[in-house]
């Protein structure tokens, strides 16, 4: 049984899908969860959907000022988060040759620089407190094995995987674990927004012949956020129903 007794946990992208499921499961395990999202109404719905302790906060992870404001507010009202989960993400499937530069910039800003900004901002108080902590980045199997129509996104998520490993090496001396979950196709609004042909082809390719539920991805993130993963760092876990089996 995973216990997070009163641990303050920050989850970005907690207004929907995988981030929402992670926030709910962290709260069920006893955590005090900050559900942060640029869609504050959805973040409030996440808090309302849980019987655990979840507070909703606004953040746009692409904006330095918004992340700093979130950090300052959380430190003042709740204390130092010892669990950081970066789940905010976004993509649109289209051929690389149709992508615009604006699209590349948005994909990289949300999916790569977002986790970088949140880690830079929140690791400072976590390191100062000196009690260790856990960082969990939600990347994607696109970043491990590639994905047609998601080329720049795959590059950004591959960046998250490499960032996870390097950061894990740097902050191990502070007893901070940094790990990464790579979801495969998962039943969330992000996946539903993709073209039907692609959704059907992906589902057929999965050995379990179905896509993941957000709760199944959340389980891996909660493991990494807990003391059960105390000696696990710099690792990448695919939750893909066997679609990918990376050695
Ligand atoms: N659903 C899948 O099939 C799948 C597969 C692989 C990886 N992922 C990854 O899992 C994570 C969660 O995705 P999901 O499927 O739950 O998507 P989702 O669209 O259901 O949820 C994403 C949440 O992130 C928020 N968000 C987006 N940009 C933001 C920003 N700049 N600042 C703050 N919040 C922002 C959105 O408002 C939304 O609430 C993402 O990082 C995504 O790339 C999802």
Image: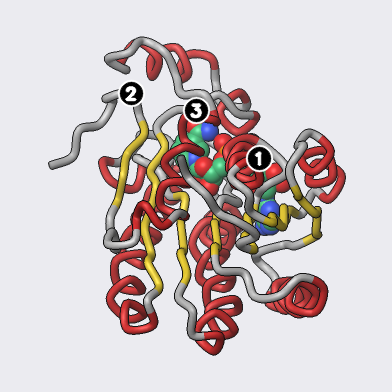
Q: Which residue is drawn at 46% across and 40% down?
A: 1
Disc 2 secondary structure class? loop
Q: Mark 3 points at which residue?
A: 186
**Callout 3 environment at 10 Å: few (<14), some (14 to 19), or many (20+)?**
many
Question: Measured along the vertical axis of the image, is residue 204 above or below residue 41?
Answer: above
Give the mark nearer the N terminus: 1 vs 2.
1
Residue name at image x 43 percent, y 49 percent: 139
Question: Which residue, given by chain and number where applicable, does mark 2 sit on?
Answer: 241
Q: Position of residue 211 (x, y in %)?
A: 45, 19
Q: Viewer-proximal residue, 238 or 99?
A: 238
Would residue 94 be visible to someone looking at this image? no
**Quarter holding ligand 1:** top right
Q: In which quarter of the image is residue 210?
A: top left
Q: In this view, does 240 lie above or below 235?
A: above
Residue farthest along the bottom direction in this orientation: 128
Tell me if mark 1 has few (under 14), some (14-19) or many (20+) residues whose alpha carbon lies within 10 angstroms of its own.
many
Residues at marks 3 and 2, CA–CA distance in whole angstroms: 10 Å
145 and 20: which one is in front?
A: 20
Place of residue 38 in the rendered image (x, y in percent of width and height, measured from the top left):
76, 54
Q: Determine whether the residue tagged by mark 1 lies in a helix, strand or loop.
A: helix
Q: Residue 114: where, in percent of width, then height?
A: 57, 64
Real-space CA distance between mark 1 and mark 2, rounded to the nearest whole angstrom: 22 Å
Spatial CA distance of label 3 from label 1 is 17 Å
Quarter of the figure with residue 21: top right
Seen at 83% across and 50% down, the residue is 40
Query: Can the viewer see residue 38?
Result: yes
Q: Which mark is residue 160?
A: none
Image quadrant occupied by the C terminus: top left
Mark 3 close to ligand 1, CB under 8 Å: yes
């Amino acid at each position: 049984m995973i216990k997070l007794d009163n641990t303050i946990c920050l989850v970005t992208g907690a207004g929907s899908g995988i981030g929402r499921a992670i926030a709910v499961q962290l709260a069920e395990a006893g955590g005090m969860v900050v559900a942060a999202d640029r869609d504050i109404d959805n973040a409030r719905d996440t808090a309302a959907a849980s019987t655990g302790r979840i507070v909703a906060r606004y953040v746009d992870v692409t904006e330095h000022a918004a992340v700093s404001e979130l950090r300052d507010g959380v430190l003042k009202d709740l204390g130092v988060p010892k669990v950081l989960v970066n789940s905010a993400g976004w993509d649109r499937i289209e051929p690389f040759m149709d992508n615009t530069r604006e699209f590349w910039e948005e994909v990289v800003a949300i999916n790569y620089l977002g986790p970088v900004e949140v880690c830079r901002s929140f690791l400072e108080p976590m390191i100062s407190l000196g009690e260790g902590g856990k960082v969990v980045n939600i990347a994607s199997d696109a970043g491990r094995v590639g994905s047609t129509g998601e080329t720049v996104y795959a590059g950004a998520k591959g960046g998250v995987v490499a960032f996870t490993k390097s950061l894990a090496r740097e902050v191990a001396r502070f007893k901070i674990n940094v790990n990464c979950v790579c979801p495969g196709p998962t039943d969330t609004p992000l996946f539903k927004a993709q073209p039907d042909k692609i959704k059907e082809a992906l589902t057929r390719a999965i050995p379990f012949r179905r896509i993941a539920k957000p709760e199944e991805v959340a389980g891996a993130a909660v493991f990494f956020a807990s003391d059960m993963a105390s000696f696990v760092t710099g690792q990448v876990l695919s939750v893909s129903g066997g679609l990918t089996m990376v050695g």
